[in-house]
Image (cartoon, grey):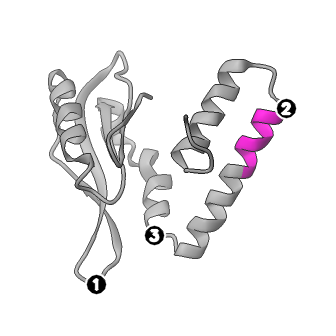
Amino acid sequence: MPIIRTERNYVHAHAIGDDDVFVRASFFGYDEAGNRVLHHMPYRGIEEYQAEVDWAVSMADRMAHPLYVVPFSYDDMLVSGRFDPLCKAARMTDQERGQMRRGIIKSMIEVLRDCDDWRVRADAYDILVQLKVTYES
């Protein structure tokens, strides 16, 4: 999944699969009560994938959280559990998000220390940069 960095945010553009037929952008926002909620743009045909990515990149710096561009196959439309982890993350408290962040950081540091594959270490380092634990020079 390519992660496109903008000036102050990110767009997670999921790769297109062989059987994908739709694409949709999603992002987190807040409702009137201040609760964090997931918003979805309308489904578009897969031929509009690049336009959807371009739109997400153009909007990313105006948003508080990253945007997601996700292609869907017909099977994805029928199996709704694919995004349960993302929905659960939206309902986390600040303390739970902090715990999860600390767990991710600890895991990535272990990968940097113990993994023999330089590509995996590079991915772990990129995640630490995104979390602002370390900075690229």
Q: Secondary structure at mark 3?
A: loop
Q: Is residue 56 magenta?
A: no
Q: Which residue is mark 1?
A: 33
Circle number at residue 91: 3
Amino acid type assigned to the residue bearing label 1 in the image = Ala
Mark 2 burial class by Cα count in 10 Å: few <14, some 14-19, many 20+: few
Amino acid type assigned to the residue bearing label 3 in the image = Arg
The quadrant of the image that shows the N terminus is top left
Most foreground residue, 19 or 87: 87
| Numbered disc in front, either 3 or 2 | 2
Q: Residue at x 25, y 75 (%)?
A: 31
Q: Horizontal and vertical percent for residue 25?
A: 25, 43
Most foreground residue, 4 or 12: 4
Q: Horizontal and vertical percent for residue 137?
A: 55, 34
Q: Is residue 131 left or right of residue 117?
A: left
Q: Which residue is mark 2?
A: 114
Please report the bounds of the magenta region as a residue range: 106-113
